[in-house]
Image (cartoon, rainbow, N blue to C red):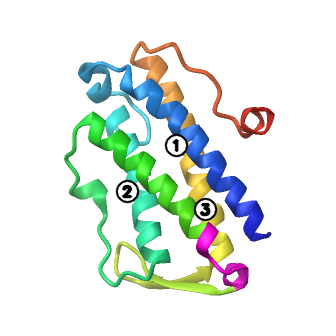
Amino acid sequence: MTKQYFIELADYNIWANNIQCDWLEQLSDEQWKQHIISSFNSIQETVLHIIAAENIWLQRLEKQEQTVWLQSSYAGTKAEHIALWKSLSQKLKDYVIDMDEKTLKENLDFKRLNGDAYSMPHYQVLAHIFNHSTYHRGQLITMLRQAGFTSVGSTDMLGYFRK
């Protein structure tokens, strides 16, 4: 895996997140917060989980001592969620662009949410971040449909490659 590969994954992440953010902007507040059975209880909670994960991984990559898990503390509006999600996705790409390629094989030492020390190679961290967002974007598409929003399309990577 190369730095260029992860730049491309970061670009794909931004592309897919922006598509979903466009859909989210069209939701009513009722749809945004509607109880839907999935990994999380609403579209809002699922979006917040993606944001929280991208944020904490970025903090870890930047070697911040004190990390913040937004899932337990963030109470922004829908518009603020969307703006934060877009900002974090761009910051992840900026991190990859600025990263030295040899860093990919080096371990990242960090603390898990439960406080346990952990270590894994940067390339695995980056692969996880982008895969994790893809996983939950798939859930969002199903949740959007269940909330009555049917103007969804594909955010599959093949669509990104074809654009």
- Mark 3 element type: helix
Query: Along the horizontal axis of the image, is 123 left or right of 64?
Result: right
Q: Are marks 2 and 3 in contact (CB under 8 Å)?
A: no
Q: Residues within 10 Å of mark 3 (few under 14, many from 20)?
A: few
Magenta residues (range) = 97-105
Residue at the spot of label 2: 52
Determine whether 14 is above or below 156 in the image: below
Residue 59 x %, y %: 41, 72
Q: Which mark is residue 122?
A: none
Q: Residues within 10 Å of mark 2 (few under 14, many from 20)?
A: many
Determine whether 120 is above or below 36 in the image: below
- Marks 1 and 2, the one that precedes in the sequence: 2
Amino acid tagged 3 = His
Q: Nearer the viewer, residue 45 or 123?
A: 123
Q: Nearer the viewer, residue 6 or 69?
A: 6
Q: Which mark is residue 136?
A: 1
Q: What residue is shown at x 29% (from left), y 58% (from top)? A: 70
Q: Mark 1 and mark 3: span between their CA atoms?
A: 12 Å
Q: Which mark is residue 128?
A: 3
Amino acid tagged 1 = His
Q: What residue is shown at x 74% (from left), y 32% (from top)? A: 159
> Splitting the image into 4 quarters, where does residue 126 fall?
bottom right
Residue 26 x %, y %: 38, 20
> Splitting the image into 4 quarters, where does residue 40 fall?
top left
Q: Is residue 104 magenta?
A: yes
- Mark 2 element type: helix
Q: Mark 1 and mark 2: span between their CA atoms?
A: 12 Å
Q: Nearer the viewer, residue 125 or 21?
A: 21
Query: Along the horizontal axis of the image, is 149 left or right of 9?
Result: left
Q: Nearer the viewer, mark 1 or mark 2?
A: 2
Residue 66 x %, y %: 29, 80
